Amino acid sequence: MRRGAGRFPRLNRAAACNRCAMADLTTIAEHVAVNQSAFREANERIEQKAAQFAEVDLLPFICECARRDCTEITRLSLEEYEMIRSDGRRFFVVPGHETCEVSGEVVATVVDRRPMFSILEKVGEAGHVARELDPRRDG
Ligand SMILES: [Zn+2]
């Protein structure tokens, strides 16, 4: 049996196709984790660029919430960003974007709320997928 099968509802494939190209994922939890990991990879590139401008205190990063169409920007210090990235299950979102349930399934918990952002931690299957997709996992 495939890992995690049956523990999360299956995706509505038609709905998934409308939103993104990841319709082959089996669970909503996986779907959300992959979406958010795409933002994480974009933010990793922002950080790499920003490292060239060390005098900047707060850097703009893209909200890593579950909404595929979210393009909101928040600002974190490099230290805050590194603190969140040090755990592959953690994501940050702008305040108000703390989606912890998808289709009735708990996929994340809020671990910290700050004025500029909240930190979410993936749980269960979503946490597992998020860690697998962590671009820093092997290094
Ligand atoms: Zn968002």
Image (cartoon, grey):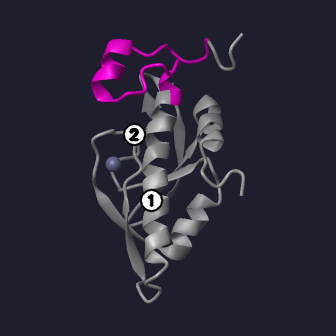
Can you tell which mark lies on residue 108?
Answer: none
Which is more toward the observer, 126 or 95? 126
Quarter occupied by the C terminus: bottom right
Is 137 located above or below residue 61 in the figure? above
Q: Residue at x 47, y 86 (%)?
A: 54
Q: Quadrant of residue 3?
A: top right
Tag 1's secondary structure? helix
Q: Quadrant of residue 17?
A: top left
Quarter occupied by the N terminus: top right
Q: Which residue is mark 1?
A: 43
Question: Could you tell me how many numbered marks the image carries?
Answer: 2
Structural crowding at the residue carrying mark 2, measured as other residues with C-alpha within 10 Å and reported as few (<14), some (14–19) or many (≥20): many
x, y percentage for residue 79? 55, 75
Given the image, on which type of amino acid does mark 1 rest?
A: Asn
Q: Residue at x 60, y 51 (%)?
A: 135
Tag 2's secondary structure? loop
Q: CA distance from mark 2 to mark 1?
A: 15 Å
Is 129 located above or below residue 10 in the figure? below
Which is more toward the observer, 58 or 19? 19
| Label 2 beta carbon less than 8 Å to ligand 1 | yes
CB-based contact (under 8 Å), mark 2 and mark 1: no
What span is colored magenta in the figure? 6-30
Instruction: Residue 80: say if magenta.
Output: no
x, y percentage for residue 104? 45, 22
Instruction: Residue 26: say if magenta.
Output: yes
Is 128 located above or below residue 12 in the figure? below
Can you tell which mark lies on residue 66?
Answer: 2
**Main SS type for the magenta part?**
loop
